[in-house]
Image (spheres, grey):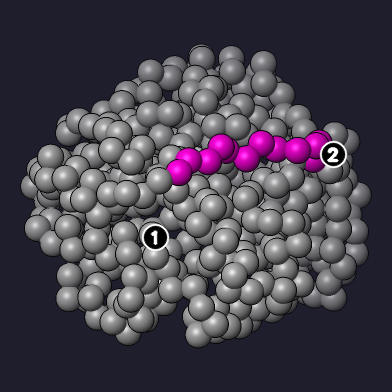
């Protein structure tokens, strides 16, 4: 398998490069330290609006000119606002990557922040916010996150109406230029590339870019507990989240991921079998691990009807806890299915240059280093059934948060 090269560019940007023999495409991911956690108070929605503005030109190029230039380079592009960073992604043919790099540098360093771009971006963000009224699961998920995580890591990527409406072009420009700096920016490149050439290209287009920022620290204790949103609907959304080890505890995190795969690994998963197939309680059920360098969480979801909601919640909670007991220990068959599924997922994503570029950046953010595919599969292979069950038995679920949305509140099981 290819090796990952870690470089630090002249400006202080961290660069992760993985050449991939046998492919013709190349992908690049930029993570700029301008995310939801750094939004100014009273201006929640800044990152959402800015992600739209950034698509509308830069360095003297208007929206149409920029779009034509990306098309000419054969380069796809996307921009999304995340919790801690604004992420830019692009994919093109390997020998055209330099053109994509130059275009991304224009919108990162000199975005077109003016009334002509800000007003329609605000309008789109407000429309997206309004669309949440038709997305009950998303509304419940956002409220679950708000209550489970500490400030400002609990913020919604959709922002708030008052914050979006109050935003000006000057607000956006000041925020962006204070956070979009090389110190803290991470770039991942994967595919048909020549590492020295990529380094030279990036050093050239970001020459003179200066600055660094500190990571945003969490403040205060999260709310957690039980919450309910009244909604006159024929559906009930049930979501739960529990505190488990973060990604930085790699030994524990890989075992939490395997447990999540046992619980929610398709039609053979325990939750599908126990909640849906045996009892017919729901139309959708799932669970999984999510984490970063600070936080780890086991999250679970059931979509059901009002008549079956209470039993769905009770059975879901019982299964999430039973897997951590001797009576509910993971079996050999479940263990092998989970490991095979996780390995297959790694291999599948390893064939995509775009997925690899993004994975390099995500790894560095979570672990402080980027892993090869061999390292990732080796971590799975190193887990034994005994070590998995031992970990689960000594790591009870804690820090529980329950969120429901529907016509009436449910009775939370003990522990929420």
Secondary element at image label 2:
loop
Residue at 91%, 49% in the rendered image: 411
Circle 2 residue: 416
Q: Is residue 334 above or below residue 137?
A: above
Using the image as rendered, state which of residue 376 and residue 13 is in the foreground: 13
Residue at 60%, 78% in the rendered image: 122
Magenta-span inclusion, residue 216: yes
Nearest to the eye among marks 1 and 2: give it. Answer: 1
Circle 1 residue: 108
Residue at 62%, 22% in the rendered image: 392
User: Toward which corner of the image does residue 111 lie, by quadrant?
Assistant: bottom left
**In which quadrant will I find the C terminus?**
top right
Using the image as rendered, state which of residue 140 and residue 126 is in the foreground: 126
Query: Few, some or many C-alpha atoms within 10 Å of disc 1 (few <14, some 14-19, many ≥20)?
Result: many
In the image, the segment drawn in magenta is 211-222
**Residue 78 in sight:** no
């Amino acid at each position: 398998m290819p090796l990952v090269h870690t470089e630090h560019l002249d400006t202080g940007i961290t660069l992760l490069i993985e050449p991939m023999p046998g492919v013709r495409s190349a992908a690049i991911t930029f993570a700029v330290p301008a995310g939801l956690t750094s939004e100014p108070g009273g201006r929640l929605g800044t990152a959402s609006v800015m992600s739209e503005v950034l698509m509308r030109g830069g360095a003297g190029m208007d929206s149409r000119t920029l779009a034509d230039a990306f098309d000419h380079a054969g380069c796809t592009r996307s921009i999304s606002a995340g919790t801690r960073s604004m992420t830019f992604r692009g994919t093109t043919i390997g020998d055209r990557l330099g053109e994509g790099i130059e275009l991304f540098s224009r919108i990162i360093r000199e975005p077109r922040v003016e009334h002509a771009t800000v007003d329609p971006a605000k309008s789109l963000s407000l429309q997206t916010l309004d669309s949440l009224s038709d997305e009950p699961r998303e509304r419940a998920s956002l409220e679950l996150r708000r209550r489970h995580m500490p400030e400002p890591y609990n913020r919604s990527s959709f922002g708030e109406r008052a914050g979006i409406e109050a935003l000006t072009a000057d607000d956006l420009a000041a925020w962006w230029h204070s956070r979009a700096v090389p110190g803290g920016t991470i770039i991942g490149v994967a595919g048909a590339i020549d590492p020295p050439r990529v380094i030279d290209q990036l050093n050239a287009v970001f020459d003179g870019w200066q600055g660094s920022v500190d990571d945003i620290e969490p403040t205060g204790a999260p709310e957690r507990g039980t919450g309910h949103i009244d909604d006159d609907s024929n559906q009930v959304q049930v979501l739960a989240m529990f505190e488990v080890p973060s990604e930085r505890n790699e030994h524990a995190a890989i075992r939490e991921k395997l447990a999540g795969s046992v619980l929610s690994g398709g039609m053979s998963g325990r939750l599908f079998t126990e909640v849906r197939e045996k009892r017919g309680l729901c139309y959708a059920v799932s669970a999984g691990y999510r984490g970063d360098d600070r936080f780890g969480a086991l999250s679970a979801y059931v979509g059901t009807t009002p008549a079956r909601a209470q039993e769905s919640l009770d059975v879901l909670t019982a299964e999430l806890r039973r897997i951590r007991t001797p009576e509910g220990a993971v079996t050999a068959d479940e263990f092998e299915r989970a490991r095979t599924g996780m390995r297959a997922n790694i291999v599948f994503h390893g064939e995509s240059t775009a997925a690899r570029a993004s994975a390099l950046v995500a790894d560095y953010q979570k672990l402080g280093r980027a892993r090869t595919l061999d390292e990732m599969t080796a971590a799975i292979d190193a887990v034994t059934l005994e070590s998995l069950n031992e970990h689960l038995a000594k790591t009870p679920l804690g820090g529980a948060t329950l969120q429901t949305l529907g016509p009436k509140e449910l009775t939370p099981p003990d522990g929420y």
